Amino acid sequence: MQRRDDGPSRQAPSGPRHNRAGQRTSSAHGPSLNAMPASPVDPRTSKSDPIGPLLRVRGLVKRFGDHDVLRGIDLDVMPGDRIAILGASGSGKSTFLRCLNFMELPDAGTVELDGRIVGREVRVRNEPARRVHDEAELTRVRQRVGMVFQQFNLFPHMTALGNVMEGLRTVRGQRAAEARARAERELARVGLADKADAYPARLSGGQKQRVAIARALAMDPEVLLFDEPTSALDPELVGEVLRVIRSLAEEGCTMLLVTHELGFAYHVASRVLFIAEGTIHEQGTPDQILRHPQRPRTQAFLERHREFDF
């Protein structure tokens, strides 16, 4: 996922190398954007890495009617990357994530997962070539590219355990005992072992979101997509979800995160993208984008977010 804008940057500490699964050994964090003088993340570039991108996007376009929501996005995502995506409402951030796991089908461009382009090209006489996708292929892609939504999307008639087990049973075809054991491990991983038998109506917003994260993790995704995972939460519940996401980053999970939590993005992301009008307007390290943005539109966006800082 590589597109670089030149800008002032700091000398980053040398960091651990990532293997194909994105495993690494260390990370540093902090509570707020202004709490530390420099981002603790070691920026990496794919150019010097012999491992190819895990996810490669080229010329991605999505239209709704006459409105172009995405206007030709290019992105390379390396194993272990942690990409924070910023942008104003309506800029195309969520649509971009939904196109990456094909909840929305792109109108043009390609998405390549681990070296293989998703879909097949079809040419009809006198018409532009287009890509078609069969449902079996998309099911496999969605297992490999997991998604965590703003509104949790839990089944209200299932317990937390049942929600996590559901994909393992219906998509993976696992037996009940095997699915149950895996679901219990994932609930414990997000700190909810004691809520396995609770129904969503009896869970807080933060707990529901952690169940949703456990459900995504149970499918062993190679990439995790977080679509503003804290936007529907009360302020006191935001931290518990961000701590889980940070722990996944420390484990080396490859992730793309749409967020307005600038401090979290600064301390956890390896790269920050600012999307405007369906394009990647500016990108770089957290230091470059959040402290030293070069483009006026990025600067104005950040100023609005900091207007009522204290």
Image (cartoon, grey):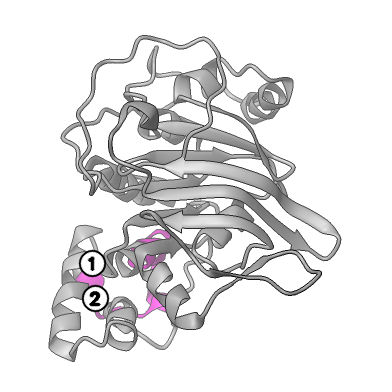
In the picture, measured across the screen, residue 128 lies left or right of residue 19, that is right
Q: From this view, report whether residue 179 is shown above or below residue 231.
A: below
Looking at the figure, which quarter contains the C terminus? top right
| Image-quadrant location for residue 23 | top left
| Image-quadrant location for residue 195 | bottom left
Q: Residue 136: where, in percent of width, then height?
A: 44, 81
Q: From this view, report whether residue 255 is shown above or below residue 144.
A: above
Is residue 292 or residue 302 the one in the foreground? 292
In the picture, measured across the screen, residue 219 lies left or right of residue 53, that is left
Which residue in the protein does label 1 denote? Answer: 187
Q: Amino acid at mark 2?
A: Ala
Tags 1 and 2 touching, CB below 8 Å = yes
Rounded to the nearest angstrom, the CA distance separating label 1 from label 2 is 7 Å
The label on residue 196 is 2
User: The residue tagged with tag 1: helix, strand or loop?
Assistant: helix
Q: Residue at x 25, y 58 (%)?
A: 190
Q: Amino acid at mark 1?
A: Leu
Is residue 95 or residue 157 the one in the foreground? 95
- Asked if residue 207 is among those painted magenta in the image, a careful observer would answer yes
Q: From this view, report whether residue 90 is shown above or below residue 51.
A: below
- Mainly helix, strand or loop, the magenta region? helix
Q: Residue at x 38, y 40 (%)?
A: 82
Q: Residue 207: where, in percent of width, then height?
A: 36, 63
Q: Residue 7: where, in percent of width, then height?
A: 55, 13
In the image, the segment drawn in magenta is 194-212
Mark 2, residues whose alpha carbon is within 10 Å: few (<14), some, or many (≥20)? some
The mark that comes first in sequence, 1 or 2, is 1
